[in-house]
Image: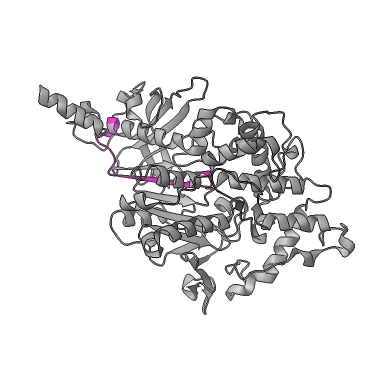
Amino acid sequence: MKTLVVLATSVLLLGVDPALATTPPRTVPACASLNQLQIPATALSLPTRGGRVTAAAVTSTVVSGQTIEHCQVDADLHPVDRSAPAIKMRIALPHGWNHKAMMFGGGGYNGTIPALTGNVPFAAADALAPLARRYAVFASDSGHQQGPVALPSLDGSFGVNDEAVRNFAAGDALKKTHDASLFLIQRAYGKRPAGTFFAGGSTGGREALIVVQRWPHAFDGVISGYPAWNNLAEVLHLGHLTQVLARPGAFPGPAKQTLVYDSVIAACDGLDGVADRVVSNQRGCHFDPRVLRCPDGADTGPTCLSDAQVGAVTAMSTPFRWPYRVASGETQYPGFPFLSGADMRTPFLGFGTTAPANPMPATSGYGMQYWDQWVKHFLTRDPAFNSLDLDPRRPGRWLDRISQLSTIQDRNNVDLRPFARSGGKLILLHGNADELVSHRSTNDYYERVRDLLGPQATRDFLRYYLVPGANHANFGAPAFAAGWDSLSALERWVSNGPSPVQPVVTDLTHDRTRPLCEYPAWPRYRTGDPDSASSFTCVTA
């Protein structure tokens, strides 16, 4: 009897349900047994009051052209603070399970559960989604539910609760969801996954870097797309832009945004050796918006910029530095290239189509609305506060709160050696025409990792690819809609196969390909068909 007790205790310490310790593993989930199942608090490594499955049913859906039968499980994870919202999570447990698991990250302020039928960021058109590959796929709303807003990802009202803020911004909900999901996978199949992966873009890309930093043993392979990793630093920059764009006459309307974009293309398109409306050599692109100045600096129509509009365009592309210290140690946000922030094809993610105001219009830029929600709910916790009244350069009595939030929102621990030692692999992707999260910020993150670990040690577990012409999440009509089967590449790498070698990215809306160059390299045209990746070479100068 003593031996059995010791065995059960050891199994619990390993995170295995003793009742299943001798259960033969299976590839078809025991779905009915999960309904209304209690998830013990001891199954999670961060504090909760446990959880409960609220629904479990076998269903089928078409994913990547295949009909996938699976058990869909919904569950609530209960907060420690009873006034905080629950974490609502969902997991799809496929028949014919491949013994792997995939967690998806969210977007914006989250508040909804990502579609488990979706794919990884910048996926190739013919790349099977994880559920179609028979991954067990799971995700959560990150610990709050969006309210009655026009765009769910722009509801920051949960920011009035400390536990909800930590669940979202510090990533606590990620680990809680991970642990609960692995508990349910074990219950359903009789064993834990042989490999666990994470993929996300934007906020989900930030979440991908959080799990790598905070829980280096939790995931074997991670894909981080266009990550908003220094979230508070970007918020301060967006607040500065909001104030600039709200000045009388400063907002460049859609026609003027198009003017700036077309002018940048005309000046910089050929610097990579071919005119294709994709600027690959962005470091060589030097554009001064003053060349578009109207006579005498007055606004005389859509063919030029007033002095105030030149100032607004310049503020978008210039690093924003704040003259005070914050606890995270961040000191600036690098700004956006002209190519991205003034792209008429996706104005909503850049300047917007109308100037910021109070109340904040739904037609203002996404970033300006994000700032407004953050000021109202995270910073001042006063929904009636006018966000235009707060100057991020001189925050006054709000400085201490900004500093406190910086330690939660800016996950700037770039010592990824524990993740590397665990055998983890990380693929980092960003488009150089991203109009919502600056690729310059991701460049900075990668350079910090490389400077700390060294080039070769970094390359042993991390690849960073900057995609020319790609914007935020292939939103709207980007110059280059990036598509690459990064998940297959990551699977091979994680299983001790080859690392990604000379990958090729496809433009999903145009019949052309380009080499994916490891940062800081970019594709220069040599000779041959300009729509073929083989006609380009990766260079750094």
Q: Is residue 8 above or below residue 212?
A: above
**Residue 140 vertical position relative to residue 302 in the rendered view, above or below:** above
Q: Nearer the viewer, residue 408 or 526?
A: 408
Which contiguous range is marked in magenta? 187-203
Residue 530 relative to residue 494: left or right:
right
- Name the residue at 48% across, 64% down: 519
Most foreground residue, 191 or 11 = 11
Q: Is residue 217 visible in the rendered structure shown here? A: yes
Residue 338: image location, x then y, percent: 67, 60
Q: Quadrant of the C terminus?
A: bottom right
Give me the residue at 50% from left, 71% from top. 532
Residue 71 in view (yes/no): no
Is 321 located above or below residue 155 in the figure? Answer: below
On the image, which quarter does residue 50 sit in? top left
**Residue most extreme to the bottom:** 527
What quarter of the picture does the N terminus occupy?
A: top left
Residue 14 in the image, given as x and y percentages of width and height: 25, 34
